[in-house]
Amino acid sequence: MVDPGMTTNTDCIFCKIVAGEIPANVVLDTPGALAFLDVAPLAPGHTLLVPRSHHKQISDLSPDAMAEVTRHLPELARAVTTAVGAEGTNVLQNNGSVAGQVVNHVHFHIIPRFDKDGLGFRWSAGTYATGEADALIAKIKEQLA
Ligand code: AMP
Ligand code: ZN
């Protein structure tokens, strides 16, 4: 199913790839999504999966539009992992410049991982003070209601 709210942004590099206006190494092409090799790979096979429709962040996607693109993640992860002989994958999805988003068109990175590949990120785990989690749960549930 094609996203009924299909939008495009003439300034967006991924919209240009979707429209075929600039070249890309496309590995998957469906009515709702496109996957192509990242031009600056963190590892061989580093692939980007994007919805055809222009939306900046996942919070801008309808549940159906999200399902239409993410349904391809399992097959892509399998294909990429096998093709490059990786031992694992990270699926990374950045929202907002503070989170590392550079291209403002929703995309999922499929990054093949190898033993001792040197990739990694700082995972500075914290803790909750007494009552802090309860207060947060209440706030999040209020937003979800
Ligand atoms: P992000 O930081 O999550 O916005 O990631 C954007 C990604 O898009 C980066 O990994 C870039 O290398 C990649 N990228 C930018 N332009 C292109 C392009 N024309 N073709 C393929 N990948 C691209
Ligand atoms: Zn776009």
Image (cartoon, grey):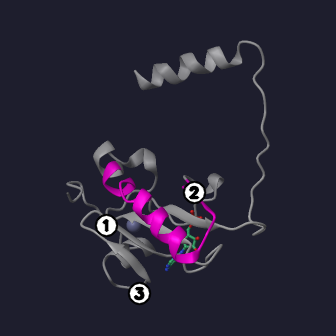
- Looking at numbered disc 2 in the image, what kind of residue is underneath it? Leu
115 vs 50, nearest the viewer: 115
The residue tagged 3 is: 23
- Is residue 36 visible in the rendered image? The answer is yes
Disc 1, SS: loop
Instruction: Characterize the local packing of mark 2: few (<14), some (14-19) or many (20 or more) Cα atoms within 10 angstroms.
Output: few
Q: How many marks?
A: 3
Q: Quadrant of residue 127?
A: top right
The boundaries of the magenta stretch are 67-94
The residue tagged 2 is: 92
Tell me the residue at 57%/76% (across/down): 84
Q: Nearer the viewer, mark 1 or mark 3?
A: 3
The residue tagged 1 is: 8
In contact (CB < 8 Å): disc 3 and disc 2: no
Q: Quadrant of ligand 2?
A: bottom left
Tell me the residue at 43%/25% (across/down): 144
Q: Is residue 87 magenta?
A: yes
Q: Quadrant of residue 63?
A: top left
Q: Quadrant of residue 90?
A: bottom right
27 vs 75, nearest the viewer: 75
Q: Which x, y percent locates residue 50?
A: 41, 64
Q: Would the CB of label 1 be found within 8 Å of ligand 2?
A: yes
Q: Would the CB of label 2 be found within 8 Å of ligand 1?
A: yes
Badge 3 or badge 2: first in the primary sequence: 3
Q: Quadrant of the C terminus?
A: top left
Relative to 118, is 64 on the left or the right?
A: left
